[in-house]
Image: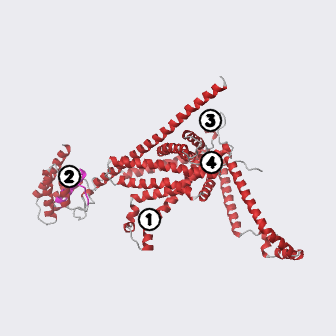
Amino acid sequence: MCAACLRDTAREASARRGRLRRLASVGMALAGVVLAWAMVFGAAQGLIAITEHSERMSWQGR
Amino acid sequence: MARPLEQPGPISLLEEAAHLLRRASLDALLFHWIGSVPLALMSLVFWHNLTHPPMSDLNCAAESLAVALLLIWMNCWRGVFADRLYRRIAGAPERPWNSQRIWRLVANQAFLGATKPLMLGVSLVAVFPFASMVAFYRNAAALAGRGDLDPLAAIAKARRLARDEGLQYWLLQCLLLLLSLIVMLNVAVTFAVLPELVKMLTGYESAFSRGGSNFVLNGLFLALVLAATWLVVDPFVQTVYCLRCFQAESAGTGDDLRAGLRRIRQAITTAAAAAVVVTLVALPVVVRAAGAVGSRELEQAVRQTMQSPEYNWRIPPSATAASGVPWIVVATDRAIAAIRSALDWAGTMIDRLLRWIFGGLGLSPMPLGGQAPAAALHWSVWALIGLALALVGWVVWRALRLRRKKHGPAVGPSIAPVRLDDEDITADRLPEAGWLELAERCLRDGNLRLALRAFYLANLAWLGHREFLLLNPGKTNLEFEAELRRRARQSPEARELFSANVRAFERVWYGLHEVFEEDALAFRQRGEEIRTRLSAEVVA
């Protein structure tokens, strides 16, 4: 393999790696937003359920 | 001699972080608060809406999205803040924010900011990885703002830097937790007294000062205190981890040496400039002064100065002064020596006792090889063992005897202490069977008034046991009737019978109407019928 072929191969590999990295960045950002939303929404629903349950219990205790 | 390389302890790390944060410019802190204040406010609003239902699912989803986006926003700004601090520690110049750098920061912090609460929760349950996990996320925030690392590389580096020094991270966590608690206490006290303070100083009465203690007992107050504490403490925590991250990274790159050299070079340049200025200004004055004062006068002035009291420290101290140890030190030394000798004496005595048991009588503590263990013990040891066994036996015998006494012959139903004519008597004092037995006894004795009361209390006890009534000394018979009407809706006959019993009882007990045996028997009959009907209802 000559030096020029080696350079071309390395450039191609680095370009492919760069594309993958860019794709990974986009995926990370989107996954972050979705995960954060799901987590906050889940926590909120849990809190609502707990609040309702405790209110029901206090009403029954009365 | 050169000092060996070592990591600073957690306390010195905290001190250095406090120093660094004090030296940091205000805009670094503002960067943090640009991100954290909106998140804190939105979280408080969200919390308030959640704990005060009704809240539709659509609203909940919209507000959740807002909180999630603000969480990512906060993490990004925390990254900017951490980058500023990191550059300050390293002495590196600021780098411009181009689109690539911003995008890398956002991608990194969006992902890590979202996974952080989840992963911290999991690691807290698992306990051991918690401190390293916190360090990983904080390191990642410190590395995210650097433009030279893509998100994945920054994550890998943060993980590598957080892997070591587990114990130090735990100590840091403990200290930071303690600090956070102290800050929280301060914030809580400040918020609690603030409305009253404003009222005292300005005369302005707000809803908070009117609320009194309700303001503090409100759930939102705690959330407010937590949010404010986080706003105060989080920049400091991030500073600590920035510093720690820099030190860990420098162990491989030598960046701390470079930063130190840069600082020295800067200091030398500044000092040289200052020295040139001082020399230029002061030289003519010095030359003039040197020409004006003769050498003899100068010598005399120096001698006079040396004899002044300020220079007494140069005179060697007298021998008595040197040996004059303060009395408190002597007393403490003596006390320590006495305690030490007492402990030595106790140790010697225990040693002698053990030697007497095992070795002093020509016996070794361990059985000799090939010899049965029993043959290696002296008779006195057997005696001690026998004594110990006897003592244990005596204790067990005593315990059994006490228990037998406690569980002694049953004394039958405890009806003797109950006085039926007592006005404060309640139905829950005895079970139904107890009241019925009392009633039968009164019936036999011809005390029909008390029998009627016992039947009525039996009635109440049964209803209370079956949870048709909630027995309470404060309740009236009318309230019992109303309660039964509510709880035994399916059985109107039972309610009627109970009402008839209540009327009969009140006529006799409060109205002093005469009661005959057939009245008491009818009362008992109605009670039994109530039981039958309500039991049938329960079964149905």
Tell me the chain of label 1.
Answer: B
Estimate the x, y position of residue A14 in percent, counting from the top left. Answer: 58, 32
Q: Nearer the viewer, residue B314 or A12?
A: A12
Mark 4 lies on residue: B246
Q: Are marks 3 and 2 in contact (CB under 8 Å)?
A: no
Q: Secondary structure at mark 4?
A: helix
Q: Secondary structure at mark 1?
A: helix
Tell me the chain of label 3.
Answer: B
Residue range highlighted in magenta:
B450-472
Mark 3 lies on residue: B372
Residue extending farthest top: A1
Estimate the x, y position of residue B191 in percent, counting from the top left. Answer: 45, 64
The reply to the same-chain question for discs 1 and 2 is yes
| Upstream in sequence: badge 3 or badge 4 | 4
Cα–Cα gap, marks 1 and 3: 76 Å
| Upstream in sequence: badge 4 or badge 2 | 4
**Foreground tag (1 vs 3):** 1
Mark 1 lies on residue: B192
Residue extending farthest front: A4
Res. B187 visible in picture: yes
Q: Are marks 4 and 2 in contact (CB under 8 Å)?
A: no
Crowding near the residue tagged with mark 2, few <14, some 14–19, many ≥20 C-alpha atoms within 10 Å: some
Estimate the x, y position of residue B458 in percent, counting from the top left. Answer: 21, 55
Cα–Cα gap, marks 3 and 2: 78 Å
The reply to the same-chain question for discs 3 and 4 is yes
Q: Is residue B323 above or below residue B37?
A: below
